[in-house]
Image (cartoon, rainbow, N blue to C red):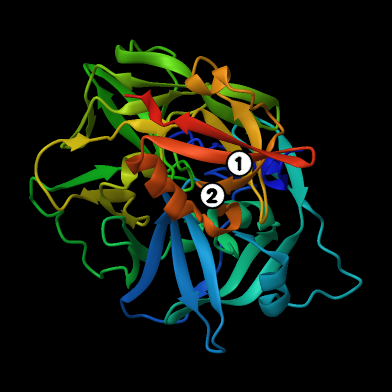
Amino acid sequence: MKPAAARISRSLKLLSGLALGLLLLAGCTTTPRHEPNNRWGATERIIIPAQIISNFFVITCSGSDGTTHHFIIDTGSTATLISPALAQRYRQKTPANEPLAKIKVRSANGGEIALEPVRLRRLPLGATVLENVPALLFDFADLSAHLGVVIDGLIGFPVFNDVLLTLDYPKAQLTIAPLPLITAAPPSSPRSSTLNFSHEHPTPLISLQMGNESFIAQIDTGSDGSLNLNPSGLHPRFVNEPRAGTLISSLQGDRQQLSGRLNQNVLLGDHLIERPIIDLSEQLSSIGGEFLRHFTLTFDQHHHQVTFVRDTLGPVTMEPRRSTGLSFSRGPTTWRVLTVIPNTPAEQFSVKAGDLCIRINGELVKDWDFIRYAALIKSTAKITYTFLAGPKEIDLELPVFELVP
């Protein structure tokens, strides 16, 4: 059974770098384009703490009543999605005789799902409040279970049309600042590069250079992936040829992801990304959190510019993707195997799709949040999984290997 999030995802990544699967809502939604018509409740610079979970940029906001909310910032989405529970607290009331028609949300693969629109009278974000926010209702239960954090919403790119938006991945913080009255020239620094993005598209599209070829890619902070590359018209060369990875699910069905490492460098403005890991795609090329986490990004939608800043000099290098060959869908008490990656050591064992894992290295799966499990995959040579087999429990020790060296 697929998680509900699968029905609305663009690429629905299964955390291919860590082989910890969940069909994810990732950089996905487009609705009929409209101006958000919202107002910010503050005119000062606001800093909001964040967490980088599975390469997603998740901000943490405390309400005046002591509650805490978590939102994914998604520059690849034109829509803002809100959980029904949060909408119940902040939505404007609609007259009973004026029900709002559902809005069809389209994935990049062309599929559609109808979601209920709401308008929030206010949405607290740290020390500021966003007022009069159009949104769509979406159930984040599966995504929350996977990440180990209750996700209350996904905030789309148009919400930040009238402010400077900065996503600082290295420091894990988001900054919202008023637009300057006079636009200063971009800073001249080997650590900084300012690029123009398309003003005709509702999400940021920039030009990248791969070898001597240029291509357009979307900046997609709502994706956990690296460089999702559509090779059409290009001639990528690989040091590690694309191989089958975890499942990718869309509204058109499931398919195996193909991941590899380029034998070419990629230029992002003046920043050089050395032989990055890429995931082949039939859709618009995009750069996600695995690629972006090396940078601080500042978006100025009025001037259609984005600035990439690094704390250090030199090329960006990407670590190998490690895996045990298994993809999981996480639950509170069990992790269900979604797929056994072909041509990996895991194929030699008895585990198969649908099997239920209840322990990792002897500890119940409920004690393994995403961050802890990711650290384990990164650091250890072997992992012991305990699976249910009828009334019995079976321990399997699987090696951790470099899925993409």
Residue visible at 53% across and 46% down? 360
Where residue 327 appears, as percent x and y from the top left, is 57, 34
Where residue 28 appears, as percent x and y from the top left, is 57, 43
Residue visible at 44% across and 32% down? 323
Query: Which residue of the protein is positioned furthest toward the right in this rendering?
Result: 97
Of the pair 330 and 89, the residue shown nearer to us = 330
- Quarter where residue 135 is shown: bottom right
Q: Is residue 210 above or below residue 70?
A: above
Query: Of the residues shown, which amino acid type is indicated by label 1?
Result: Thr
Check residue 281 in the rendering and tell me which mark sits there, or answer none: none
Query: In the image, 36: left or right of 376?
Result: right
Residue visible at 45% across and 43% down? 224
Query: In the image, 206: left or right of 84?
Result: left
Check residue 362 in the rendering and tell me which mark sits there, or answer none: 2
Of the pair 188 and 229, the residue shown nearer to us = 229
Where residue 44 appears, as percent x and y from the top left, is 32, 80
Query: Which residue of the protein is positioned furthest toward the bottom in this rendering?
Result: 65
Tell me the SS state at disc 2: loop
Crowding near the residue tagged with mark 1, few <14, some 14–19, many ≥20 C-alpha atoms within 10 Å: many
Query: Of the residues shown, which amino acid type is indicated by label 2?
Result: Gly
Tell me the SS state at disc 1: strand
| Dot 2 and dot 1 residues touching (CB under 8 Å) | yes
- Considering the image in quadrants, where does the C terminus appear? top left
- Quarter where residue 173 is shown: bottom left
Check residue 386 in the rendering and tell me which mark sits there, or answer none: 1
